[in-house]
Image (spheres, helix red, strand yellow):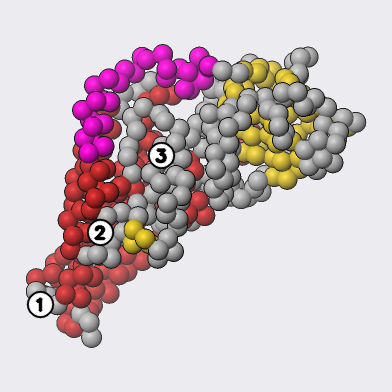
Amino acid sequence: PDWRDNAPAVARAWKYFAAGYRCFPANIAFAWYGPLHHSIVWPLYLFPVDRPIPPSWLLRSFPEVGGDRIGECLVYQHTLSEGLDLCRKMSRLWQKGLDIFRDLLPAYPDDPARIADIGLAEAIGLQMKSACNLLEFYLLRETMFFHQEDHLERLRAIVQDEIGNSKLMREFCAKDSRLGYHSEAEGYLFFPEKLSARIELLEKLLKEDFPEFRLDAPWINAYTGIAPVGKQAVCRYGTPAAAMEKTGDSGIAWNSYYDAEKLFLIFRGIVGKAFTVELEPCRLWPPFRIDFDASGQPLLDDLVFRETPQLDYLYCPDEITVGIPLEIFAGYRREGFPIRINVWSENHAWVERQPWPNRLLHRDFNPACAGWLIFE
């Protein structure tokens, strides 16, 4: 009754839409923090800033503007390339349905409801394109840093494309006031003024940051850990170092070693003390975290994994050894590069903590408060 003689064509379009949505990365972090909601107003960063991703369901909370910690919307359930592949499939299938919708537009010159339906499908398709651009941008940026591959031209093209996408979405918003509204947040995630601000930021990025970027800049080796800055601990192969790393004045000390299959962490001075270990195996990803209570019992933060990792725990008097399978970080940890770590208790830490405000799923982790674990 809504589409009349064109109902069969619309049904075909909806089958494409449905097939596209089946490719949505089925991941709780992608649903809560994913770029499909409002990447159309996120800045892009050529130089790393290690800033968090905003929640989609809250407004006027920390943070309000999208950062570059892209792993927060994927956690350890999808790699960045997997997330991009799925979003590209979703976008391609949506565009096939959208092509059918566009052909129908001349048939409804005086039907605002049908025009709005087609316009809404256009806006959703634009959000999918923007999400793909954002994921590709950070995939290429990180590859450029870690493998010294020059992707500047493609990154520049993505920024230019996003300027066009934000301009087009601004036009759509002017025609349809529903766009950008999030019912759970009870407000707008994007709107014309915010889209205009994003356009200005992207234009500034092209004008100022791209000309300044140098692939041989020393800060890149500091970022990747090739030339780490800050606290460092060596992780030997096969046997731990004799010296222990001290966690402030807490009396808790730790060291580590690894073999072909596992990373082993050893903690001493832990009797009657609660403490936490955080491992960031991949830049821009949330940490792998284990909380130990005062009796030495562990609580593993496993919601970020596809399946709960199976860890080994060995308890001796005043000592705990944890064996972490390295395979749980497959696709995230980069071979040949160190990872980041911190060990802390309530008022003491290996690297002094300045926790961020708590966020659902990501808690209070601040990536600036971590040292380097260097695999010897």
Residue 145, position as x, y percentages in the image: 40, 24
Q: Does residue 308 appear to the left or right of 205 in the view shown?
A: right
> Which residue is pictured at 76% across the width and 14% down the height?
243
Residue 360 at what x, y percent from top left?
A: 55, 51
The mark total stands at: 3
Q: Is residue 32 above or below residue 219?
A: below
Q: Main secondary structure of the magenta part?
A: helix
Describe the element under mark 3 as helix, strand or loop. loop
The label shown at residue 110 is 1
Quadrant of image for the C terminus: top right
Residue plotted at (69% across, 40% down): 290
Q: Quadrant of residue 256?
A: top right
User: Gap between marks 3 and 2, in whole Å?
Assistant: 23 Å
Q: Position of residue 277 (x, y in %)?
A: 68, 34
Secondary structure beneath dot 2 equals helix
Residue that carries the numbered disc 3 in the rendered image:
67
Going by the numbered disc 1, the residue's amino acid type is: Asp
Q: Circles 2 and 1: CB distance less than 8 Å?
A: no
Q: Amino acid at mark 2?
A: Ala
Dot 1 alpha-carbon crowd within 10 angstroms: few under 14, some 14 to 19, many 20 or more = few
Give the magenta part as a residue range. 200-229
In the image, 188 versus 45, the foreground residue is 188
| Label located before the other in sequence (2 or 1) | 1
* Gap in angstroms between the C-alphas marked 3 and 1: 43 Å
Q: Position of residue 375 (x, y in %)?
A: 62, 20
Q: On the image, which quarter does residue 95 sit in?
A: bottom left
In the image, residue 325 lies in the stretch drawn in magenta: no
- The quadrant where residue 124 appears: bottom left
N-terminal label among 3 and 1? 3
- Residue position marked by numbered label 2 in the rendering: 123
Q: Mark 1 falls on what kind of element?
A: loop
C-alpha separation, residue under disc 2 versus residue under disc 1: 21 Å
